Image (cartoon, grey):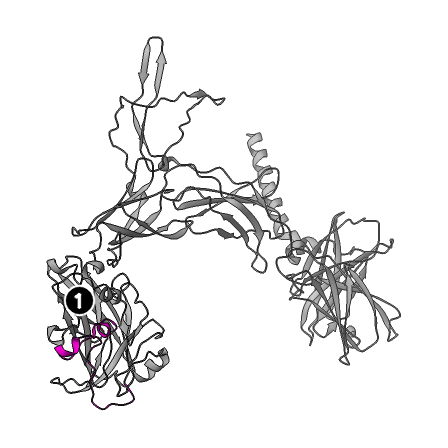
Amino acid sequence: MIFQKFYVVLLHWEFLYVITALNLASPLSPWRFKLFCIPPNITDGAFLSPAGISKNSSDSSGEYDAVVKATFNSSGTYTSELSKTVFHCCFGNEQGENCSVPADNTGGKTFASTVKSLVFQQRGINWNIQCWMKGDLTLFICYMEPLFRNPFKNYHFKIHLLYDLPDVIDDLPLAPQKDSFQIVQCNCSVQECECHVPVPTAKLNHTLLMYLQITSAGMIFQSPLMSVQPMLVVKPDPPLGLHMEITDDGNLKISWYSPTLLPFPLQYQVKYSENSTTIMREADEIVSATSLLVDSVLPGTSYEVRARGKRLDGPGVWSDWSSPRVFTTQSSLYCSDSPSIHPVSEPKDCDLQQDGFYECVFQPIFLLSGYTMWIRINHSLGSLDSPPTCVLPDSVVKPLPPSSVKAEITVNIGLLKVSWEKPVFPENNLHFQIRYGFNGKEMQWKMHEVYDAKSKSANLPVPDLCAVYAAQVRCKRLDGLGYWSNWSSPAYTVVMDVKAPLRGPEFWRVINGDITQKERNVTLLWKPLMKNDSLCSVRRYVVKHLTSHNGTWSEDVGNNTNLTFLWTEQAHTVTVLAINSIGASLANLNLTFSWPVSKVGAVQSLSAYLLSSSCVILSWTLLPSDYNIMYLIIEWKNLNEDDGIKWLRIPSNAKKYYIHDNFIPIEKYQFSLYPIFMEGVGKPKIINGFTQDDIDKPWNDAGLYVIVPIIISSCVLLLGTLLISHQ
């Protein structure tokens, strides 16, 4: 008896270890294992009985050790109605290792060989199998998923489960008889099979013997003998009535009910995911009670929860997961519509503040609880209570101001970008407000609203990309509850280059040397770019040269605003580029010096009239020309002083122009008008001094249509005044 018990070993937790060919197979996983079926090399029609089953009663004597070790007798035959070739199966792990396979030999001996998964994939099929006792303790169920491999994937299959449930509890018969096994046909679909074995309540603690026969493509695949105690592999029903609530101390309580009453206690595995505006995490806990407390619960957080159960002590099978339940803490907040004064309350003294208000501090509080509050004024004549009101702390939150506020002008885009970090508290979606403006003593704020709770930045158009801006951010609950936070600390932009200069500088030239000579010194003059054109600085200027013989070169002049070079060829074109940290200016002026074009005259007449000591009006007429005038250059200088020339670039369609400068009427000035062609600088029209004859012409040209109506109106008013006075 003791010798027999030594070999009878239950599968680990649910199943006995499979014993085959004098070698214990690897322990099966508690509720899931693999069955590998491989065709032998010799298919002589011989059928091997299930491991451990004798073919007649005489074979049982002295063979009990072979029974419990699942011996295969390769010399025996089985005359079934199918009379088909039998392929032997074995149990293994996920990699197909440690699989005991019977050998084809005539001596009846067996050996264990380790078969890699690649062999099974090429020559056989495998099955995922899990077995359990149903939660109502009426059916033993085996569930199979076939994973077909060539050459069996296109064939239908049938599965039968043969089982024997002896009447004894502790002892097995010396050799289980083939005739004692009952057969059930499994219900199969394309992707799964399920086998049901009825188990009487009185035999739940007995040992169930069973094996599988799989028929496919004219062949039979047969598993080793398995044994299991149904009570040890009970799979409970999922927990019922999963629900959640907020406790008085602000924790989340997850509760459920046990499934169908079982003769043993259960343990439970609870999985929940926490999703808020700042964090997303998952947790997994195992408890023996039918509830679980989750702390650190914040408003606006949603939880998705599910649970399953398993036997608390000893082996067992986990139940299926319950249906997931979703719970949002915001939905649990409650405040009475008609609060009343409670006889039992916690008083708090209120202190008078400098601003004339009283302040009362309540600590600690739970955000998800409602508090009934009222003010009691104590006086020598008695006490006076205000009407009670219900307060939800979560609804009167004043958030902390956003942190890590930054302000910058975006490079290559040219927008004011304000970024921030959302405060950790509260967990609700927030509405953000930005104020920004030029940094100065008197700030003129502009406001911008951000309603996207997930936003952490905003891009704002500003008129001056090279100015210093200040920006602040505050926040409030998106649903309108609570109060605005304080403004964050101001963030300031730093003036830096945001784009390449919009254009290069306007420039002109001074030519020195004899007009008759072919070599002349040319000095280029230009004005420094303003910030709005340079965006926002200029590191250096570069002058590009192009001569009539395709000679090209560049000169870096740094921050200087002039350059002198020698003009020696018939045509010489120059371009002045402005360069900052982003790049070089894209729109640039070209100026060509050409000996032939310099003799082309396009200005017929030029007149200069002194209007005041600060304004001179120039008017001119142009001649028809074969060249297209791009623009005009006005140049003037005081001939009595050596203070250099002054110049302006004006459109080609202008007929007159007002020059604003300091003019002394007794001084002598020279005025020049240059036509600028694409081919070069044309011949200028030059006058010395102001025009004295035809002095009324400028008035006709410039202000005739303004002065005459004023004079007429004045005369009419004067005449009317005289008539009224006379009457």
Residue found at x 63% / y 52% = 466
Q: What is the quadrant of residue 38 in the picture?
A: bottom left
Residue found at x 32% / y 14% = 383
Q: Is residue 497 above or below residue 339?
A: below
Q: Nearer the viewer, residue 68 or 16?
A: 68
In the picture of the structure, the residue carrying the numbered disc 1 is 172
Decide: few, some or many residues near mark 1? Use Cα within 10 Å; few <14, some 14-19, many ≥20. many
Report the magenta residues as a range: 40-69
Mark 1 residue type: Leu
Query: Is 508 on the left-hand or right-hand side of 327?
Result: right
Q: Position of residue 320 (x, y in %)?
A: 24, 59
Q: Nearer the viewer, residue 498 or 172?
A: 172
Task: Provide the secondary structure element on which disc 1 rests.
Answer: loop
Q: Nearer the viewer, residue 287 or 472?
A: 287
Magenta includes 64?
yes
- Which quadrant is the N terminus positioned in? bottom left
